[in-house]
Image (cartoon, helix red, strand yellow):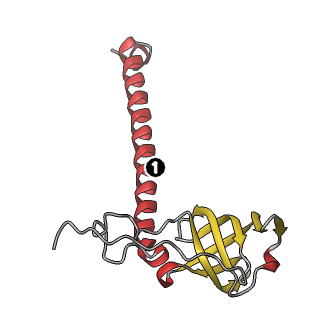
Amino acid sequence: MNLQTFFQSKKFKWLLAGIGALIIALLIFQLGATVGSRKARFEYRWAQNYHRMFGGPKGGFFQDFTGQDFVSGHGTAGDIIKIDGDNLIIQGQDDVEKIITIASSTVIKSGANDLTASALKINDPVVVIGSPQEDGSILAKIIRMFNPEDNLPPPPPRPKKFRMWR
């Protein structure tokens, strides 16, 4: 059997198709492994920053089944304690500090009035709704300012904690 006839045979074509299918399968596997690795790396970094950036439950997870100790990563309420360019630091419940990033699309309101970021001042009480970022900060979608002179009602009392163990 000479080389010319081998390259024109059906066996060679099947061998070539098999090698091509194997290469495509390996590329798909590598793509899946890369995507999975990136997702796992994101989840790991997010989990590492959770307690530092969002406060988390004081006694750890699964201690308070009422859900009152959990902190939302999608927003916060509290007083502005620092303004640094497009970033705000808000001191929220239980003295947890959160970093808020203001984008050009962020809506800032006080009552029915639209405001700009320059209207925000230290010690202003605000409520922020946004989306959590990979570094633990919150990208603000809307910031609602409240007048400090308004007599806002106090938050409702927290129910007693139900603990299953102890």
Residue closer to the observer: 162 or 142: 162
- Relative to 135, is 33 above or below? above
- Identify which residue is drawn at 70% across, 68% down: 143
Amino acid beneath label 1: Val
Quadrant, the C terminus: bottom left
Q: In this view, does 58 lie to the left or right of 91?
A: left
In the rendered image, which quarter is residue 101 located in? Answer: bottom right
In the rendered image, which quarter is residue 8 located in? Answer: top left
- Relative to 46, is 78 above or below? below
Residue 15 % position (x, y): 37, 22
- Identify which residue is drawn at 75% across, 85% down: 121
Residue 48 % position (x, y): 40, 72
In the rendered image, which quarter is residue 61 located in? Answer: bottom left
> Which element type, helix, strand or loop, lies under badge 1?
helix
Q: Which residue is tagged 1? A: 35
Residue closer to the observer: 66 or 141: 66
Residue 28 % position (x, y): 43, 38
Few, some or many C-alpha atoms within 10 Å of disc 1 (few <14, some 14-19, many ≥20)? few
